[in-house]
DNA sequence: CTCATATATTCTCATGTTGAGCATAAGAAA
DNA sequence: TTTCTTATGCTCAACATGAGAATATATGAG
């Protein structure tokens, strides 16, 4: 007979409100039953009833959060053995397919046990809107340095240094906003996130730093959900540049500043206002409605709308983040 | 009890030889047993033995073709019901995870029943190296036009026209080399590829054109493997621009022309030689070795090698295809 | 009413990048 | 030596990007 397989479906559902990116998370009791933790909305595929993966995902999300999905895009499929600790206890092999969904934030039915959480709570080192996060200079830099030095031999040390430099923009390398997953993966291996400790089979961190300072960066999520979130953020940042995705997060009309703040929230960096305007306006991404927004404390801003024709004119129209030209 | 699920693993394995992109395909008898067809190397995941999806994939490929995989990247997971016709006959629900792999072409063990096939045999409209393919002006344009006009009402016609224009670069829209999957999907829906007819439940094409000319474009593959190939080609073209992937397909040293021809084979367009040189040289992607290649019928070309340091300096270093700046 | 303040919008300018093509170099073959 | 072929080097116009000055139009304080 065939051993049991389960297809899990996970949704990273993103909205931007008050200039902050939010993740839709559900509360659940963890496997060991010892407490409550945050998780992505998710559920298994019913192989006999669900016609498509997306339909099944939508149904689970609807049931667990009451939210209706709009733009949905497949992210990645995770299939390592023992991803789900229940496998060790005789549970089925769970292969999970993760999706990214963009919605306009709406009030939640509190009874559902779901809530919107600022996603930088989970990945605090990814938010550069206020300048390079202090956490990078402090805990992360020093722990990485210890990890690099702890390499077996000279060549291992070199490889580790190259990896750390590329991931975190050290040693002359530039910071790359899209490398979110690589960074989380490295922090996990180095043992700087709570999940690393939790997943270690015998309570031992996989790569215990020489003198473990006990750093536990950011808020954890159930299972490997924080890793999935990292994938989602990286993908979203990358795609922003060549697809008009932002508009899925905005209402029909908006001011250019609101558009800019939304992009900044996702990209995690501040943009030059005048150049941003030039880009989206001359790039044909938006068109003015002639109407103005009232009372923002200064000169009223014109309301714009997404210009759908841009899809025909420029198949690869995005918002052009800084320093992300060809190389950089 | 849980209904049966099977995780299928498929590999799109790509090499470039003699300036042509090649797909590694295996010969197999089709489900109905009526004949032989080409398919991607593939096999199911063993949920109890295979530690990771990549390892399982590598083992299947090794067994079916004798080829060892180098660079491997996950593409997409396909899970629609009845993707695999055996499901209708009581077979398990097959969810397939597709991978893209890049290798340097090597002679095959003929006994293995695998061979290298020019991938433009399957997607002939994607090769623009000799100018806009005639097939686009002929069969495709006219069939698409019929399909557009066959829309239910005015708004359906408009939507169809927008979709056709965007996919195939008609009506003023530019051609976008990365939209490979969208194009195949549209041709499938319109009934222009053999798979559409084959998959139609009762022998009826899903959207029969008003007067079906019986056009069957390109060579078919088993199941939905041609769709998977289309995904792979699109992804590869996109990634070429911001990752130094090409070098996975080349030997340690190469002339700039060889590098250029390899990129052109993948991108399906011709590039300006001098500018290409400027890009990869000044972009720090390659460095000269000082050695020359002998006897190519003209001035000998210098041999270059990939400059690994570029990974540290410019996290997003690719080869910059034409017309693919920000928008265009 | 006038001014300070806040935000929106328009322009300029230096610098880089890209697309295109001319010019020169270095081999092989006639 | 000439011619052909490919490699390599250089120039130029057009366009895109980063930074910021200058101007416009609202609100609220005095």
Image (spheres, coloured by chain):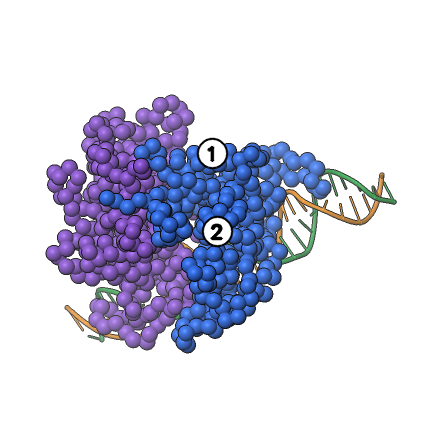
Chain colours: A blue, B purple, C orange, D green
Give A127 or A148, whichever is nearer the viewer.
A148
Does A27 sit left or right of D21 as displayed? left
* Up-down relation of residue D5 to residue B85 (above or below): below
Name the residue located 31 percent from the left edge and 62 percent from the top edge.
Answer: B248
* Up-down relation of residue B76 to residue D10 (above or below): above
The chain ID associated with circle 1 is: A
Q: What is the x, y in percent for residue A244?
A: 48, 43
Name the residue located 25 percent from the left edge and 27 percent from the top edge.
Answer: B208
Counting residues from the start of the chain, the first of labels 1 and 2 encountered is 1
Name the residue located 28 percent from the left edge and 74 percent from the top edge.
Answer: B292
The chain ID associated with circle 2 is: A
Q: What is the x, y in percent for residue B227?
A: 28, 43
Does A164 sit left or right of B117 as displayed? right
Name the residue located 20 percent from the left edge and 46 percent from the top edge.
Answer: B39
How far is mark 1 from mark 2, CA to CA?
Answer: 22 Å
Q: What is the x, y in percent for residue B56?
A: 28, 54
Q: Which residue is mark 2?
A: A226
* Up-down relation of residue B77 to residue B66 (above or below): above
Give B80 or A314, whichever is nearer the viewer.
B80
Give B103 or A210, whichever is nearer the viewer.
A210
Task: Name the quadrant of the N terminus of chain A.
Answer: top left
Q: Name the mark on residue B248.
A: none
Q: Which residue is mark 1?
A: A63
């Amino acid at each position: 007979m065939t051993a049991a397989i389960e297809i899990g479906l996970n949704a990273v559902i993103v909205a931007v409100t008050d200039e902050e990116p939010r993740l839709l998370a559900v509360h659940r009791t963890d496997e060991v039953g010892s407490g409550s933790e945050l998780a992505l909305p998710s559920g298994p595929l019913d192989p006999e009833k669900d016609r498509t993966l997306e339909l099944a995902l939508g149904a689970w999300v609807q049931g667990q959060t009451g939210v209706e999905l709009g733009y949905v895009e497949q992210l990645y499929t995770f299939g390592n053995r023992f991803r789900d600790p229940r496998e060790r206890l005789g549970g089925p092999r769970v292969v999970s397919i993760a999706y990214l969904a963009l919605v306009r934030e709406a009030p939640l039915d509190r009874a559902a046990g779901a809530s919107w959480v600022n996603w930088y709570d989970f990945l605090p080192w990814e938010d550069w809107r206020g300048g390079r996060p202090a956490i990078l200079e402090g805990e992360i830099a020093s722990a990485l340095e210890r990890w690099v030095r702890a390499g077996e031999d000279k060549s291992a040390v070199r490889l580790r240094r190259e990896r750390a430099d590329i991931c975190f923009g050290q040693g002359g390398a530039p910071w790359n906003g899209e490398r979110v997953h690589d960074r989380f993966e490295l922090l996990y291996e180095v043992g700087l996130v709570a999940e690393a400790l939790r997943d270690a089979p015998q309570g031992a961190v996989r790569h215990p730093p020489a003198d473990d300072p006990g750093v536990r960066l950011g808020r954890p999520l159930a299972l490997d959900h924080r890793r999935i979130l990292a994938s989602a953020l990286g993908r979203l940042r990358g795609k922003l540049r060549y697809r008009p995705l932002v508009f899925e997060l905005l209402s029909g009309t908006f001011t250019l500043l609101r558009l800019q703040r939304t992009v900044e929230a996702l990209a995690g960096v501040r943009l030059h206002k005048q150049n941003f305007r030039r880009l989206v306006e001359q790039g044909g991404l938006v068109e003015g409605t002639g109407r103005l927004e009232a009372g923002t404390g200064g000169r009223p801003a014109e309301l714009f709308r997404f210009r759908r024709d841009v899809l025909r004119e420029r198949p690869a129209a995005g918002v052009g983040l800084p320093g992300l030209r060809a190389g950089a």
